[in-house]
Amino acid sequence: MIPKKAQEILDFWFKETSSEKKFKKDEAFDQTIRNRFLNDYELASQNEYDDWQDQPMSTLALVILFDQFSRNMFRDNKKAFSQDHKTRLIVNDAVYAGYLETMNESHRFFMILPLIHSEEITDHDMAYYLLNKYLREHEEYNQIKKFWQDHTKAIRLFHRYPHRNKVLGRDSTLEEKEFLKDPNSSW
């Protein structure tokens, strides 16, 4: 049995939240996530929820908390990305533990997604491997792959996501500024 808070995260994300809301900028939705899960995020950031990694579904809840909820709770703030490194480690451990084998496609998608959020090309390479292994039959496989390819293009060109530069206090190159004028360059 997974921890009650982990189940709340999963229920909120997979039962209460529509697909379109998950990827749409919406301050009211962001506030709902802050109200319900900010304390959990803070506790998890202090390693209080590390034992969630002992089971596949509570690991997924931790990944959603760090990778998805952080981007809602801290939109336009560098804190949105502060747990990205830890999240990638959690995902890698989960992959090697065989956790993806026990999940459905929707769960697998959100478990793999932090690898695409990474600014490391090796993480992207692993994400495509996992996409083809676990999500080949996903009804939106082609759209997912295209979306991910747009992300990977930025990493291959700049070794980072230019749209994060301002928030992270990084200077943008002229090439990055030009890139950001294109569609599908900011997420």
Image (cartoon, rainbow, N blue to C red):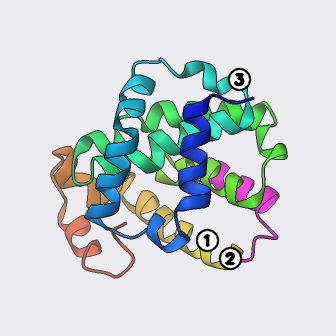
Tell me how far mark 2 sits from mark 3, CA to CA.
30 Å
Where residue 144 is drawn, which disc sits there?
1
Q: Depth check: 172 or 4 in front?
A: 4
Residue range (magenta)? 125-140
Q: Is residue 165 left or right of residue 81?
A: left
For the residues labelled 1 and 3, say whether their Cβ atoms are less than 8 Å apart: no
Asked which secondary structure carries label 2, the reply is loop
Please name the residue shown 41% across and 63% down the image. Answer: 154
Q: Answer whether labels 2 and 1 touch (C-beta < 8 Å).
A: yes
Which mark sits nearer the N-terminus, 2 or 3?
3
- The answer to which quarter of the image holds residue 37 is top left
The tag earlier along the polypeptide, 1 or 3, is 3
Q: Is residue 159 left or right of residue 149?
A: left
Find residue 102 and report its horizontal and vertical position in percent. 83, 44
What residue is drawn where x is 23% and y is 75%? 178
Q: Which residue is mark 2?
A: 140
Q: Quadrant of residue 176?
A: bottom left
In this view, 175 is above or below 129: below
